[in-house]
Image (cartoon, rainbow, N blue to C red):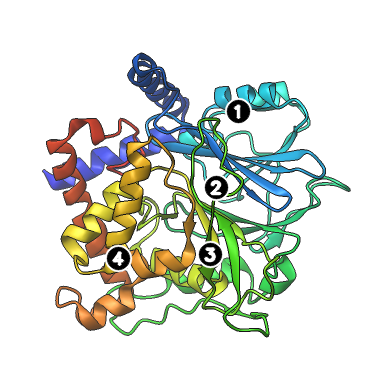
Amino acid sequence: MEVLKSGLFRAAYFLYTNTSAGYYYHAHNLATAERKFRPNDIKAHSKETHFDYGPISVHVIPFCMDNYCYIVVDTVSLSALVVDPGDATPVVDFFARNTNYKPIAILCTHKHWDHCAGNGELLEKYPHLEIFASEDDGAYLSNRTFRDSEEIALGQGLFSSASITAYEMPGHTVGHALFCISPVSSNRTAENMKIQSNSRNDSIGRILSLDPDFENESLTITSYQHHHGTSANKHQTIPTITYNGTGRLGENDHEEITNSADEIQDEATLPPLLFTGDCLFMNGIGKMFECPSVVMAATLQRIMDIFPDTTLVWPGHEYTMTFVKFTLNEIEPENEVLQERFRKISELTEQKLPTVPSLFKTEKECNPFLRTAKLSSENKDFMKKSPSDILQILADRKDKFAKSLNANSPAASSSEFVGSNSN
C-alpha cells in the first residue's frame, strides 16, 4: 500500500509541476481561501504589513491559506521587486494603492504554482517585467536566469539602494533559489560573499555523489571567503512586528539585537534580507520533493556558512506555529529560546499578524533542522547519526506530528498541494 501511495504521489506531483493541471489546482485553492476568509472580512490568513530598513521597505503580502508574497521597494528610486507572486490580485492591488512605486522585476524562488502563478497576469499588466528563476526549475514564464551566487543587475538607476544576489539551493526542488537583498550600508554585499568554488554543476555532482548512509559523510561543497567587521559586540536596531491598525509598523517600535558573528561595524549597518521560499522556514524546512536528504543537509550547511546571524529570513509560508509546536513537543522541550519564541508568535498569531521575518541567529538557536550537530551529540534519538539521516528523521516525525495536530484542529490544515502538511 505504501508503494502504491508513493507511486500515486509521484504521478500527482509530476502533473502538478509540469502541466496546467497544477495551475488550475492552485486556482482552486485560491478560491477556497477566499471563501474561507471573506466572511471574516479579511483578505488572507494574516494582515498585510511592512518593515523598513533604511531605504528598503519590505511589504508582506499574505495570500491563499498560508502563502507569503513580498514586495520589496527601493524608496529612493521608487522601483520595486516582487518575490514569489503566487497570486497576482493582491500585487496589482498594492501597486494600485501605491502608484508612485514601479514594479521592475519578479524573483521566483522555485517553480511550484503557489509561488509563480501570478507571473502571467503581472507580465500582461507590466510588460517590461524581468522574471528571474533558476534554469533548473524554470518557473512559469520566467525570462531571465542566473548563475549560482550571481549578483543581479537591473539597469542603471533601478533598485540602486541594495544589491541582489541569487543562490541556487537545491533540496525542496532541484533548482530552488534564494535571493539575498543587501541594503547599501550592509557589509554583506555581493563582494563580501564571493564563492571560491567550481561551477554549480560540479558542486551538485559532488553532493549527489555522497552516500546518504555513510555516517561520516562530508557536507562541504564549496569554500567561502568571509569579510568580517573589525569591531566586536556591536549592535543594531531592527523594527519589531508591531501593528498599529494601518498595516504599517509603528515608527518608534524597535528592539536591540546583539550580533555575535561580529558582522556589524556600526549602528547604521542594515541587515541582509534573505528570501528563502520553501527551502528554509521559521523553525523548519521545506519538504524534500526532488532531492535526497543529503542534498538538503548540504544546502542548509551552506546557508549557515554564508549568512551572518543578523540576516533576516523571509520564508514563503506561514508555518511557524506548527514547526514550533513540533519542536517543543518532540525535540527540545527545554529550549528556553524556543519557549520564548512560542510566546511571541502566539501573540502575533492571535492578532492575525505575520510571524515573519526571523533573525537567523534565532533560527540557529531554535530550528532543529539547523541543529543536527547538536542533536547528534546530545539527543539520544539522534546519537551518532549523520546530518542527512537526522534531517530525514525530523521530516518524517514532523509530518506525523502535523497530521495529528490537524486531525485535532481541522482549521489549522491547509488545502495547498504544496501546503503545510506537505512542505
Q: Which residue is mark 2?
A: 109
* First reached walking from the N terminus: tag 3 or tag 2: 2
Q: Which residue is mark 3?
A: 256
Q: Which residue is mark 1?
A: 91
- State the SS at label 2: loop
Q: Looking at the image, which residue is at 40% across and 19% down?
A: 34
| Callout 4 crowding tier (Cα within 10 Å): few <14, some 14–19, many ≥20 | many
Looking at this view, is 19 or 148 the one in front? 148
**Label tally:** 4
Report whether residue 295 is seen: no
Tag 3: residue type? Answer: Glu
Q: Looking at the image, which residue is at 47% across and 44% down?
A: 316
- State the SS at label 4: helix
Looking at this view, is 277 or 186 the one in front? 186
**Gap in Å between the C-alphas at discs 3 and 1?**
32 Å
- State the SS at label 1: helix
Looking at this view, is 95 or 375 the one in front? 95
**Which mark's residue is nearer the viewer, 3 or 1?**
3
**Gap in Å between the C-alphas at discs 1 and 2?**
17 Å
**Which mark's residue is nearer the viewer, 4 or 3?**
3
